[in-house]
Amino acid sequence: AVTLVSLLFCGYRLFTGQYRVPTPPPRSVQSSYAYTIYLYWLIGRGRYSCVYLGTLNERSVAVKVYSSAHRQKYINEHYIYSLLSLQQQPSITHFLCADERVDSEGDTQFLIVMDHYAHGCLSHFLSHTSVDWTSCCRMMHGITRGLSFLHSEVLTGDESKPALAHRDVSSTNVLVRSDLSCVLSDFSLSMSLARDPRHLHGDGDSVAISEVGTLRYLAPELLAGALDLHEYGTALKQVDVYALGLLFWEAFRRCHDLFLGRPAPHFQLAFDSELGQEPSLEDMHMLVVRDKSRPCFPLEWRDNISVLRQLKDTMEDCWDQDAEARLSAHCVEERLSSPTVLHDVSQQVD
Ligand code: ADP
Ligand code: MG
Ligand code: MG
């Protein structure tokens, strides 16, 4: 026990010290330019980074650590947060500060410090918990509101922000608070869609338009290499909405109110039953581009139940093969807040 305690309090203090904020921080930490960051233990691993539970001064936080190999992703994510941080949007991960430091082996590490979300990412949460209809709608509404906010251009004075594309919408890039509300997270591949060139590139570095997110969630036009680069702002938003449709499918399959009193099926990522854990680009191309296949709806989701018909329509209108026919994130948000959708579903499904 003594060893464990000393490990917790000493061993996991990976580094400590006083640091200067490299760029003006968001309002929440503006009063203090010097702060101390401790890292405790690993809570998540992404494609480009490791995420630790930590503290920023006394506050419990999550710290995303990029190695120097992924410096460009760090610069990009920090830049995106700097565009978003003036407006504390409840559906976007709350960013606190960014930092650079040298670890004990002499390698530079790049840190993004943010609020810690107790339930971690959505795919992990749904893999061990099913949810009721109201919670599920609220969760999906939060994510959709976050995406709709990201996609919108705001032109009013200090609060202005360019339209942004997320470019890696997936259930591992959504985080869940302890009250089950959700935020959109992981902006390492996100991109400004501004016509104003000052907003186009973060610090001289930027991510390429052709660089893509998680294979499983790629829209057919990306898999086919047919993204409309002339209208890339519109095209990249449509790509995000496609992935949102898949995310809805993953989440509502875990809504026990939609299964006639039986337990909801186990959590599955979109296309898991068709292609398994590690689909290849060729597999995805055959399934999504050639066969125009999409995840199957459970048999219990009968069309004669209006709320289920609406839900299925919404998913289909998000993942339409024709990108131009897809809904906007704002429109999905409106559909989710309509009174018929929020109507107590259990009375209709029983
Ligand atoms: P990457 O860009 O490397 O994919 P992410 O930002 O997606 O990194 O983080 C990787 C994982 O770490 C997430 O899927 C999630 O499980 C966990 N994670 C990230 N940020 C937080 C946070 N603020 N609170 C709790 N868990 C987090
Ligand atoms: Mg991620
Ligand atoms: Mg990422």
Image: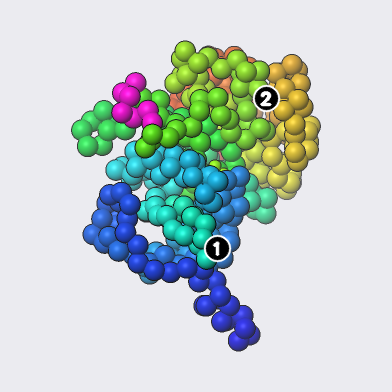
Question: Residue at (29%, 43%) from the top-left corner?
Answer: 86
**Which residue reaches farthest bottom?**
2
Residue 125's spot in the image, x, y percent? Answer: 61, 52
Secondary structure, mark 2, is: loop
- In three-dimensional space, the C-alpha distance between marks 2 and 1, rounded to whole angstroms, equals 60 Å
Q: Which residue is mark 1?
A: 105
Kindly identify which numbered label has been placed on residue 303.
2
Query: Was residue 333 drawn as part of the magenta stretch in this picture?
Result: no
Say if disc 2 is inside 8 Å of ligand 1. Answer: no
Quadrant for the C terminus, please. Answer: top right
Instruction: Please tell me whether residue 275 is drawn above or below residue 318 in the rendered image.
Output: below
Looking at the picture, which amino acid does disc 2 mark? Asp
Task: From the viewer's perspective, tell me whether residue 105 is left or right of residue 158.
Answer: right
Question: Residue at (48%, 32%) from the top-left corner?
Answer: 207
Magenta region, residue range = 195-201
Observer-nearest of 148 and 153: 153
Quadrant for the N terminus, please. Answer: bottom right
Is tag 2's residue or tag 1's residue first in the polypeptide sequence? Answer: 1
Say if disc 1 is inside 8 Å of ligand 1. Answer: no
Looking at the picture, which amino acid does disc 1 mark? Glu
Label 2 environment density (alpha carbons within 10 Å; few <14, some 14–19, many ≥20) = some
Kindly identify which numbered label has been placed on residue 60.
none
Residue 110's spot in the image, x, y percent? Answer: 46, 52
Secondary structure, mark 1, is: loop
Query: Was residue 200 drawn as part of the magenta stretch in this picture?
Result: yes
**The image quadrant in which ligand 2 is located:** top right
Q: Marks 2 and 1: which is nearer the front? A: 1
Label 1 environment density (alpha carbons within 10 Å; few <14, some 14–19, many ≥20) = few
Instruction: Please tell me whether residue 232 is drawn above or below residue 211 in the rendered image.
Output: above
Q: Please indicate, yes or no, whether residue 176 appears anywhere in the rendered image.
A: no
Observer-nearest of 123 and 43: 43
